[in-house]
Image (cartoon, coloured by chain):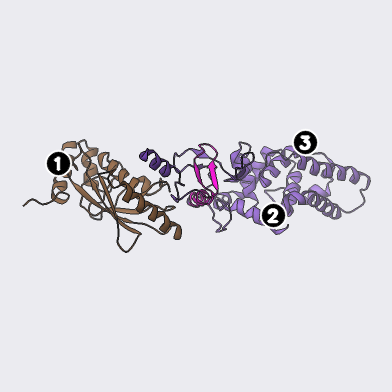
Chain colours: A brown, B purple
């Protein structure tokens, strides 16, 4: 418990120091609870998520970093490995392949990589997965783009 | 300059706690550095997730498989924490060893298959030498103490059995029950310093193997057939022992037993 607190504090300091280094990720710790974090990540370029800003919610367990943080999308996203309703993310490093050397920052990077490289064979969003699996890349992209525009971009006007 | 300083301070800390390393330790294959307690804790977490024993730990940084943690390096000597005991690092510990070790966690009952122990004694079969005993004992003791080199122990036990047999020849008026008891306590005495808590069962197993008159392969067949469905039950069975090796009950259990009779 103390260990997780100490480690999160280190990460917090690191985030403050590196703020400018990674413009695609903005990690913010909850004011009153170091086990709650949110992140804003930019949709990777040359993907249907480009131009969107997606909000992630982190819930860090007390056994962290021996146990992975729980992460979900708060922003709606159309992606095979993200649950459309809950925002739950299917990503190996958040489950079996977790390593204590990952940080919240690197998890964000992994999620950005997942956005750019969906795994349609382990879908949480079956509609999205099926579009890709059936080879309808255009169909997938236009759906994903539409939701990016609807949910992840600032409203005009 | 500034950047260099910064990057070295980022690279230096333990990748698990992100703090300066306390009790520097390394994984034996990739030599990535961690606090000893951090990496040890992580190995326990990994072990608790697997129902079967993994002979290695994947490095949290590079995923290279290591089988021990090296720590306490003072320039000339170091200490090594074997993650899953000797047995699993070496090739000698085969499936057969594993099965034999597992046998010790199953109640044997009175006999195995149709092996007739009392006939073995009544019909003086014990006067014949058993040519497979050496190999059988080697495997059995390797399995039990999880060491490869058990020759000394095997020779010791074999020697005791042989000299007992030579003496028996001359003295055949004593009832076979007494002989049986004498034999067993003598083997127990010889084995106890090495097998401790496992001794009694070991003696029973020795007797059973001798009484079967079978070679190892045939004996294993009979034995496995006798146990039948019981073996899978043992695999994956968990013992919540908060030991250094909480991996599978087999190991922590044996440590405990050994200590008990210390």
Q: Earlier in the sequence, mark 3 or mark 2?
A: 3
For numbered disc 2, what is the local secondary structure? helix
- State which region is magenta: B22-48
Q: Nearer the viewer, residue B260 or A33?
A: A33
Subunit bearing disc 1: A
Subunit bearing disc 3: B
Q: Please give the residue where the numbered disc 3 appears in the rendered image.
A: B131
Residue at 88% in and 54% down: B175
Quadrant of the snapshot with the N terminus of chain A: bottom left
Q: Please give the count of numbered marks on the rendered protein.
A: 3
Q: Nearer the viewer, residue B34 or B123?
A: B34
Pointers 3 and 1 within a single chain: no
- Asked if A36 appears above or below A136 in the picture, the reply is below
- Which image quadrant for residue A131? top left
**Picture coordinates of residue B89, whole percent (x, y):** 59, 39
**Picture coordinates of residue B233, whole percent (x, y):** 55, 52
Residue at 54% in and 46% down: B24
Neighbours of disc 2 within 10 Å: few (<14), some (14-19), many (20+): some
Residue B141 covered by magenta stretch: no
**Residue A11: numbered disc:** none
Pointers 1 and 2 within a single chain: no
- Could you tell me how far apart the alpha carbons at marks 1 and 2 are, in whole angstroms? 67 Å
Residue B31 covered by magenta stretch: yes
Residue lying at the far front of the rendered structure: B1
Q: Please give the residue where the numbered disc 1 appears in the rendered image.
A: A142
Q: Is residue B92 visible?
A: yes
Check if mark 3's residue and mark 1's residue have beta carbons within 8 Å.
no
- Asked if A7 appears above or below B69 in the picture, the reply is below
For numbered disc 1, what is the local secondary structure? helix
- Could you tell me how far apart the alpha carbons at marks 3 and 1 are, in whole angstroms? 77 Å
- Which image quadrant for residue A47? top left
Q: Please give the residue where the numbered disc 2 appears in the rendered image.
A: B258
């Amino acid at each position: 418990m103390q260990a997780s607190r100490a480690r999160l504090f280190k990460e917090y300091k690191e985030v403050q120091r590196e703020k400018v280094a990674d413009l695609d990720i903005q990690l913010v710790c909850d004011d009153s609870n170091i086990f709650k974090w949110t992140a804003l990540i930019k949709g990777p370029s040359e993907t249907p998520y480009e131009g969107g800003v997606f909000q992630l919610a982190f819930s860090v367990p007390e056994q962290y970093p021996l146990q992975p943080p729980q992460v979900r999308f708060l922003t709606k996203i159309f992606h095979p490995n993200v649950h459309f309703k809950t925002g739950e993310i299917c990503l190996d490093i958040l489950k079996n392949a977790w390593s204590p050397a990952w940080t919240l920052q690197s998890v964000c990077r992994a999620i950005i990589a997942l956005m750019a490289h969906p795994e349609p064979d382990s879908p949480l969003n079956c509609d999205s997965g099926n579009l890709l699996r059936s080879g309808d890349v255009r169909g997938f992209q236009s759906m994903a783009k539409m939701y990016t525009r609807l949910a992840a971009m600032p409203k005009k006007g | 300059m500034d950047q260099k300083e910064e990057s070295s301070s980022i690279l230096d800390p333990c990748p698990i706690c992100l703090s300066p390393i306390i009790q520097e330790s390394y994984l034996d294959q990739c030599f990535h550095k961690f606090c000893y307690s951090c990496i040890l804790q992580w190995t326990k977490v990994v072990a608790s997730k697997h129902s079967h024993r993994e002979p290695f730990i994947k490095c949290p940084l590079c995923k290279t498989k290591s089988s021990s943690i090296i720590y306490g390096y003072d320039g000339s000597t170091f200490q090594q924490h074997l993650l899953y005991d000797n047995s699993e690092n070496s090739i000698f510990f085969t499936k057969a060893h594993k099965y034999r070790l597992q046998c010790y966690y199953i109640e044997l009952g009175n006999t195995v298959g149709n092996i007739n122990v009392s006939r073995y004694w009544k019909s003086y079969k014990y006067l014949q030498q058993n040519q497979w005993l050496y190999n059988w004992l080697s495997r059995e003791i390797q399995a039990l103490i999880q060491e490869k080199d058990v020759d000394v122990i095997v020779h010791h036990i074999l020697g005791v059995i042989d000299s007992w047999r030579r003496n028996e020849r001359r003295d055949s008026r004593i009832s076979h029950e007494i002989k049986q008891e004498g034999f067993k306590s003598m083997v127990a005495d010889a084995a106890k310093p090495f097998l401790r808590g496992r001794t009694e069962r070991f003696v029973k197993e020795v007797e059973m193997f001798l009484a079967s008159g079978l070679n190892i392969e045939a004996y294993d067949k009979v034995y496995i057939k006798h146990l039948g469905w019981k073996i899978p039950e043992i695999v994956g069975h968990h013992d919540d022992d908060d030991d250094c090796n909480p991996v599978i009950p087999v190991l922590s259990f044996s440590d405990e037993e050994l200590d008990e009779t210390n």
